[in-house]
Image (cartoon, rainbow, N blue to C red):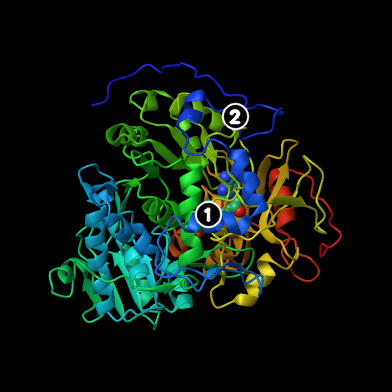
Amino acid sequence: MAVKKKTTKKKSTPVRKASGGPKKMHGEVFYPSKEVVAQANLKNWDALAKSAAKDLQGFWAKEAKELEWFKPWKKTLDDSKKPFFKWFADGKVNIVHNCIDRHLKTSRRNKLAFIWESEDGKEHRTYSYYALNREVSRMASIIKSLGVKKGDRVTIYMGRIPEIVFAMLACAKVGAIHSVVFGGFSVDALQGRIEDSASKLVIICDGSYQNGKLIELKRIADEAIVRCPSVENVLVVRRTSHDVPFQQGRDHWYHEMLETPIAKERFPTEVMDAEDPLFILYTSGSTGKPKAILHTHGGYMVGTYSTLKYVFDIKDEDRWWCAADPGWITGHSYIVYGPLLNGATSFLYEGGPTFPNPGRWWQLIERYGITILYTAPTAIRGLMRFGEEWPNQFDLSSLRLLGTVGEPINPEAWKWYFTVIGKEKCPIMDTWWQTETGMFMITPTPVVPLKPGSGTRPFFGQEAEIVDEQGKPVKDNEEGYLVLKKPWPAMLRTIYKDPDRYVSQYWSKYPGRYMTGDSARRDEDGYFWIIGRVDDVIKVSGHRLGTAEVESALITHPAVAESAAIGLPHEIKGQAIFCFVLLKPNINGTPELAEELRQHVAKTMGAIARPEEVRFVDKLPKTRSGKIMRRVLKARAQGLPEGDLSTLEE
Ligand code: WTA
């Protein structure tokens, strides 16, 4: 067991003239230490930033050439039909070839690709690259036997077990498009996503564990699938072994299929066009249904490979732990694809940070010698509350870099992470990006001087700007809308089946520039500070949810006439969901009903969407055209000025 260790407060020497920052800087700055600069793969940030700015395509072409292509591309960037950009067009590739097949020809075949531990700590599994190929091939041959062809959509709905990774890679290997639905979502959310993608096959597990409790994924999936006529087959991975209903003909146990001659340990990797879709991932937008963000084999591959390599300085001896869920973009890019493209060893953990106690994560870091930890501010804040006694019981000296993503990190949490976890020797990579961007967009690298709460500057080849409503750049330190000025290889290509929405959502307000939906400011050193979403997207514990989805869940309850959901600041979660509900006539707004509505949202959408509070109102503030003014509700709930009310109905 772990021995109680004293925190060593040995400070390392900061390098003030590191290449990654302006000469004289403003505010509180943490410079990289000599040790960090000495081990960094990329020492000269400025030089690379300069050359990438001069020759964007040259930069990305060079990165792409570090990977293997079945046939070289003709044009690095084709912007002739912008905003429908193409990258590496006419190139032939498959991301799985670069994630797995390529490594089998080298000594990396024996290297661990994944280390996995179960939530209860009783099971451990490891997979070398060689073994990973076997597992993915077996899954690929099985899904092919179930009729999945190139271009078909496959929905994946599972807990955090190695098979979710195999399933994603198996789809990519045969050229199918995966659509992973976060295992914390429930019936309606799952149904909507299966229906929209018209998936033929759904891959699930019987159940998953969450804080010691069994989540009956198959029962949830069954409820959703009966309403989805496109689904022909369901492949069920056994995880919990509890009794589940089984529909003969439609449902197939994975472990049983593995015993048949259908399962092949070697299976060919499909040759794909660089621009062929790799996956769709549903994410919340400002209005209406979640939108399916589409990413492709070639560009996404190059973007995730290159960003992980530079930002987390990946080396062969690292043990990388991205503590996100594979069901979100962070998991897609930096649990599955980015690490494998870099030939890294990843740790995958089934559970969450505080079960059975708040020392669990720190125990795992010691147990597996994790060198880089990448997580969300909400997890840091949640763990910080239990005090340093927990991390101090474990040896965290293997750590060399830390990372954060998903929402702005408050300086207090940053400093705790830096001091208590990183012992002041691990720089924190605050990476700003989105489901749509596919890869880190505003981020430091280890040699860049840091300011707590800022993601520093755009990644190589990118330029960001803060603009006002009309699209005019604002002054330093003024708040405005964050836009991106250059295309990048891992950019979303479209919204699946809805190209018009792709154009209107991202490229119409500020022509020629990508609208992020975030507000931010840039300081006098050119550092970006993200403030938050400007649309109706709420980030609850770093998870992206839309007010519209919560409202549609509420409206399915028989007592609800109308509702409005908003996000309000929350100490641990960053933001929490508050709902205002107008009841149908003659229904009383009792505390019991409020509780019932909270549970109703959790049951239909998933526990992450459970509102913090439900308040009953007689009226909702609306514009004369009938749009709910969430801004007014937000201000009122926080006791803030309500701003311009001239468009209010009455
Ligand atoms: C927010 C997550 C501040 C932002 C990868 C963005 C952040 C949204 C950061 C995308 C960060 C992400 N600092 N805010 N480092 N990273 N965000 O699609 O509002 O789940 O627009 O992708 O998360 O959320 P998504």
Q: Amino acid at mark 2?
A: Ala
Q: Is residue 568 left or right of residue 179?
A: right
Q: Between residues 288 and 54, which one lies in front from this camera angle?
A: 54
Q: Is mark 2 within 8 Å of ligand 1?
A: no
- Quadrant (top left/top right/bottom left/bottom right) for the N terminus: top left
Mark number, residue 525: none
> On the rendered image, what quadrant is the C terminus found in?
bottom right
Up/down of 482 relative to 383, above or below: below
Q: Tag 1, which secondary structure?
A: loop
Which residue is under mark 1?
Answer: 439
Query: Considering depth in this image, is 448 or 533 the residue closer to the camera?
Result: 448
Q: Quadrant of residue 486?
A: bottom right
Mark seen at residue 18: 2
In what element is the residue under mark 2?
loop
Q: Position of residue 289 (x, y in %)?
A: 57, 70
The residue positioned farthest toward the right in the image shown:
646
Residue 353 in the image: x percent, y percent?
38, 40
Residue 326 percent across, percent down from the top left: 40, 56
Q: Is residue 591 above or below residue 353?
A: below
Which of the two labelled residues, at mark 2 and mark 1, occupies the earlier sequence position? 2
How many neighbours does mark 1 have within 10 angstroms: few (below 14), some (14-19), or many (20 or more)?
many
Q: Label 1 is placed on what type of residue?
A: Met
Answer yes or no: is residue 493 visible: yes
Taking the image as shown, residue 10 lies to the left or right of residue 19, namely: left
Real-space CA distance between mark 2 and mark 1, rounded to the nearest whole angstrom? 25 Å
What residue is rendered at 19% in x and 70% in y?
A: 264
